[in-house]
Amino acid sequence: MLGLKKIKAPWHNLYLDDKKMLNFKIRNCKLTKVIPYNSTYYFLSRIVNAWLANEKGIEPNYNAKINKLAFKLPSISDCAQGKIYLYKKIS
C-alpha cells in the first residue's frame, strides 16, 4: 500500500505458527495469554520509519528517533511476529 520493499525474513529466523501455538498442549498447563510485546515498535520502525526514509529517498535508519520513541510505547496491536505465549501450571 505504501510502496515499501517487502520485509524478508533473515535466513536464521524460525517463526512459530500462531494457529499451532494456540492449539499446542502442555501437560498440566493452560495457555492463559498471548502478549504481542513489540507490535508498536515493529509497526513504527518497519512501516512508519521506512516510509519516512522512502519519502526522502534514503535507507531507513534504525537508530532514528521514531524507533527510540516506539521502544518506549506500550504494545497497542498484534502486528508483529514477536509474541509471548504465557502458560499457567494447573493441578
Image: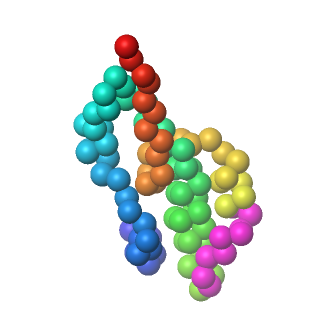
Q: How many marks?
A: 0
| Residue 15, horizontal then vertical, whole percent | 37, 58
88 w.r.t. 82: above or below = above
Q: Please, which residue is most extreme toward the bottom here?
A: 57
| Residue 69, horizontal then vertical, whole percent | 71, 54
The magenta region covers: 58-66
In this picture, residue 42 sits left or right of residue 85: right
Is 26 in front, or is 58? 26
Q: Main secondary structure of the magenta part?
A: loop
65 w.r.t. 56: above or below = above
**Which residue is depicted at the point 52% across and 50% down?**
39
**Which residue is depicted at the point 32% across and 32% down?**
26
- Residue 39 seen from this side: yes
**Which residue is depicted at the point 39% across and 68% down?**
1
**Which residue is depicted at the point 32% across and 47% down?**
18
| Residue 24, horizontal then vertical, whole percent | 28, 38
Residue 3 sits in which quadrant?
bottom left
| Residue 29, horizontal then vertical, whole percent | 36, 25
| Magenta segment includes 64 | yes
Is 75 in front, or is 47? 75
Is 66 in front, or is 28? 28
Is 46 in front, or is 2? 46
| Magenta segment includes 68 | no
